[in-house]
């Protein structure tokens, strides 16, 4: 046998031995460990590890293997996590029906039920979640080139273009850039979130397509006002999700029944019960009504989601969240 080869054989660390040198918590996460030309390449399953634990992985592995004869370099790779946990899309056929308000408050109400929830604002051109969750002016940082969501005061971390832009800065991006921004947000560090609520812009553009193709939601909540026109558009939104194989959790009627803040009389400026009937016609579940209420608009504008407070507004969102939570448990 060639003497240098013989030497190499002798000094080559045994892969199984290398594995035994790793701390037990890391050894059980090893997906593969290879050795070639003095270099050990270790792939670790980092699922469920915190950002801090991930950051220390490389050092811990290198430290444990250091000094082994024949070993000159250690490379550590982490297995890509699934980009997000379960995605819950909140969509509408039409703009201005209160979809963003509903997405924010549904996320907060789910979190109050004990769910671990994150929120992605996919309305790239008209982001509003920073305002709704009171995170304006906060900037997400990047860790290992992935965005770390901004913490809100309501237990729901959020990523929104509004946190990435200067206030009032307009975006004139083309489709691929928008899709890229959405991907960055959805692939952020959502490690602690079990559900990521995504506030989709209305319609069937690039954002919705990227979303449905690349990050298939576990379910979609459709928001509509009781008007006929909004309901027709809601039907289209339902069809888009169905065609893409995304199950519909159900339809919510927003801005239903106006309680006059002066005399208390309830009127129905946009009609009543339309969304419930439309949901029935489409064979979809009806998830409930959120009244048209000045307090909802006022608190939302002030960055205090009504779902985080007390009273009838919070109760309406809590009832909705309970239905959505049950649906998630059943699917
Ligand atoms: N139930 C409600 N009662 C009172 N005001 C509401 C209610 N729901 C939403 N609003 C108000 O209606 C306006 C539009 O709501 P929102 O921005 O959530 O709609 P949207 O459907 O997301 O709109 P867009 O498609 O333009 O993003 C906001 O000023 C919001 O505060």
Image (cartoon, rainbow, N blue to C red):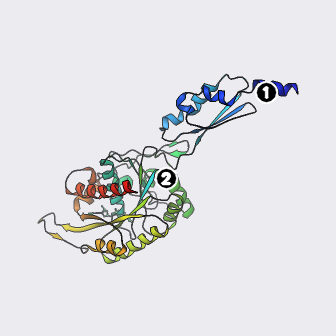
Label count reads: 2
Examine the image and state in which quarter residue 14 appears. top right
- Give percent across and percent down for residue 180: 55, 57
Residue 172 visible at all: no
Residue at image coords 55%, 32%: 26
Q: What's the mark number on residue 92?
A: none
Between marks 1 and 2 in the image, the one whose residue lies nearer the viewer: 1
- In whole angstroms, how far apart are the C-alphas of marks 1 and 2? 47 Å
Q: Mark on residue 9?
A: 1
Q: Secondary structure at mark 1?
A: helix
Left/right of residue 313 with respect to residue 24 in the rendered view: left
Q: Quadrant of the C terminus?
A: bottom left
Task: Determine the residue positioned at 49% across, 38% down.
Answer: 49
Q: Nearer the viewer, residue 33 or 186?
A: 33
Of 187 and 329, the residue lying toward us: 329
Residue at (49%, 53%) from the top-left corner? 186
- Say which residue label 2 marks: 186
């Amino acid at each position: 046998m060639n003497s240098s080869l013989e030497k190499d054989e002798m000094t080559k660390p045994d892969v199984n031995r290398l594995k035994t040198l790793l701390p037990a918590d890391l050894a059980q996460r090893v997906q593969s460990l290879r050795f070639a030309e003095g270099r050990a390449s270790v792939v670790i399953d980092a699922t469920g590890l915190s950002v801090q634990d991930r950051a220390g992985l490389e050092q811990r592995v290198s430290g444990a293997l250091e000094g082994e004869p024949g070993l000159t370099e250690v490379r550590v790779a982490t297995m890509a996590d699934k980009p997000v946990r379960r995605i819950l899309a909140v969509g509408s056929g039409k703009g201005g029906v209160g979809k963003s308000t509903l997405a924010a408050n549904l996320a907060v109400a789910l979190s109050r039920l004990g769910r671990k929830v994150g929120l992605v604002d996919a309305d790239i051109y008209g982001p509003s979640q920073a305002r709704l969750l009171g995170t304006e002016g906060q900037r997400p940082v990047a860790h290992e080139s992935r965005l770390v969501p901004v913490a809100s005061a309501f237990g729901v971390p959020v990523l929104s273009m509004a946190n990435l832009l200067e206030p009032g800065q307009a975006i004139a991006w083309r489709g691929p850039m928008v899709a890229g921004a959405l991907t960055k947000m959805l692939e952020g560090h959502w490690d602690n979130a079990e559900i990521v609520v995504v506030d989709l812009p209305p319609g069937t553009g690039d954002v919705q397509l990227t979303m449905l193709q690349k990050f298939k939601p576990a379910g979609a909540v459709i928001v509509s006002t009781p008007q006929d026109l909004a309901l027709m558009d809601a039907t289209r939104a339902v069809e888009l999700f169905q065609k893409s194989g995304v199950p519909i959790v159900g339809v919510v009627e927003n801005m239903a029944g106006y309680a006059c803040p002066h005399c208390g009389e309830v009127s129905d400026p946009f009609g009543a019960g339309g969304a419930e009937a439309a949901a029935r016609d489409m064979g979809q579940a009806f998830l409930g009504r959120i009244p048209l209420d000045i307090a909802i608009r006022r608190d939302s504008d002030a960055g205090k989601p009504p779902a985080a407070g007390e009273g009838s507004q919070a109760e309406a969102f809590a009832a909705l969240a309970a239905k959505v939570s049950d649906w998630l448990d059943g699917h």
